[in-house]
Image (cartoon, coloured by chain):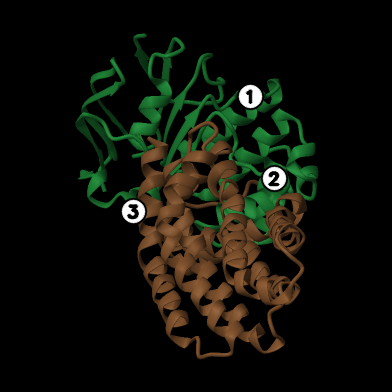
Chain colours: A brown, B green
Amino acid sequence: MSAPRVALAPERAVALAVSGVGAAWLALLRDLTLAFRRRGQLVQPLAFFAIVTLLFPLAVSPELTRLREIAPGVLWTAALLASLLALEFLFRDDAYDGTLEQYALSGQSLTALMFAKSAAHWLLTGLPLALMAPLAALSLGAPAAAVAGIVASVAVGSVALSLIGSIGAALTLGMKRSGALLSLLTLPLSLPVLIFGARATQLAIAGEPYLAPLELLGALAVLGVTLAPLAAAAAVRISLE
Amino acid sequence: MSNQPLRVENLHLWRGERHVLRGLTFSLGRGTCLQVKGANGSGKTSLLRTLCGLIYPEEGRVLWDGEDVRRDLRAFHARLAYLGHEPPLKGDLTAGENLRFWVGVRRRLGVSDLEAALARAGAGGCSTRLVRTLSAGQRRRVALAGLALLAVPLWLLDEPTTNLDADGQELVGQLIAEQLARGATVIAAVHHDLPRAVPVIEQLELAA
């Protein structure tokens, strides 16, 4: 058996070093690979979103004008809760199997790695929700002309939801049955996203300009990208103590 | 570079009401292995986690090459490998994928390096198998392969021989011996003595 080609020479260590971006890319790839091997977890939030939005016409009224009025609220409440559903799994498995510990000890920026995990959460939950939202909106009586606005608002708003959620998920790490606490922490912080998202959708359905609330959603997403990974990394470090 | 790269000064750690580490002070040279023993709950794992910076001690400091590790924790982390009770492996990934992601976050890794490390750890046939289909001992071997691939000068090992058969335990001894021969430093928390293959062992007994 040959020994692995490992060495401690500093020049070799420098040559083999991985950049922060490279490390984050690998963390993202790992989460995506794992998600596609556990399809049940992947489908759960999407199925929830579809069921909630499709049940509303049955429960409220099949009248399209009435459904169109409540469509923004229904879409955004369902999207928020669906996003929350997937958050519980964001760090849990990694905390149990020691992956988070290894991330914290990797010598890489934990903030970058946390950003990669939130990005994976958005790609697996937010983006599919944004792509599903027009179908749900059409079933709630939204006109076809509103599709672009609905996709844009859910896509941008869900970025903010994933990032805000990552803070809650990190803060509740290590707690048993953390779902309720996670909701309590995350929902109040997500209210601005819900308000501006529903407003953008409402304007898109009414055929009016929706850029202003969309820009506010974008601002929240940028704020999330800037601050949430830092906060999540700090919370993970505390949970590892 | 100092000949005693690791120095621990007056380390005090409380876990709740328990004073787990009480003014621990020691130095470790290159090519030296410290075997930490003690009963369950004596603080072996807490010591390792404190040394690697996962736990903040109430008092005292850890120095690497004369520098307090807290001054640049990331740089210190880049020089150490910590293997806890459970191997940090994902059941839904193959052994090869696990190493590619775990080790790959820290250093670039060639396929030949990876295969050689798995073969060296006696897990050559596990590369393409999902980790959840491996036995506990095989998982430990895969984790040992990852440890060797990290190529860092400080190993902190928590019960490294857990779940391993006699051959596996010898392998741990050989890997540590090779690591020491390269001038590295190893600290291992154990219940039973490390295999005889480890040449230089210093002892530390923690009181419960």
Residue A132 visible in the picture: yes
Q: Relative to residue B139, is residue A238 drawn left or right?
A: left
Question: Residue type at mark 2?
Answer: Leu
Question: Quadrant of the rendered structure where residue A30 is?
Answer: bottom right
CA gap between label 3 and label 2 equals: 27 Å
Q: Chain of mark 2?
A: B
Q: In this figure, which residue is indicated by the disc labeled 1?
A: B169
Q: Are marks 1 and 3 on the same chain?
A: yes
In the depicted view, which residue is nearer to us: B7 or A5?
B7
Residue B202 visible in the picture: no
Question: Callout 3: few (<14), some (14-19), or many (20+) C-alpha neighbours within 10 Å?
Answer: some
Question: Residue type at mark 3?
Answer: Ala
CA gap between label 2 and label 1 equals: 16 Å
Give the vertical position of A31 relative to A210 (above or below): above
Query: Where residue B33 sits: x, y (%)?
Result: 42, 28
Q: At 57% across and 21% down in the image, what residue appears? A: B195
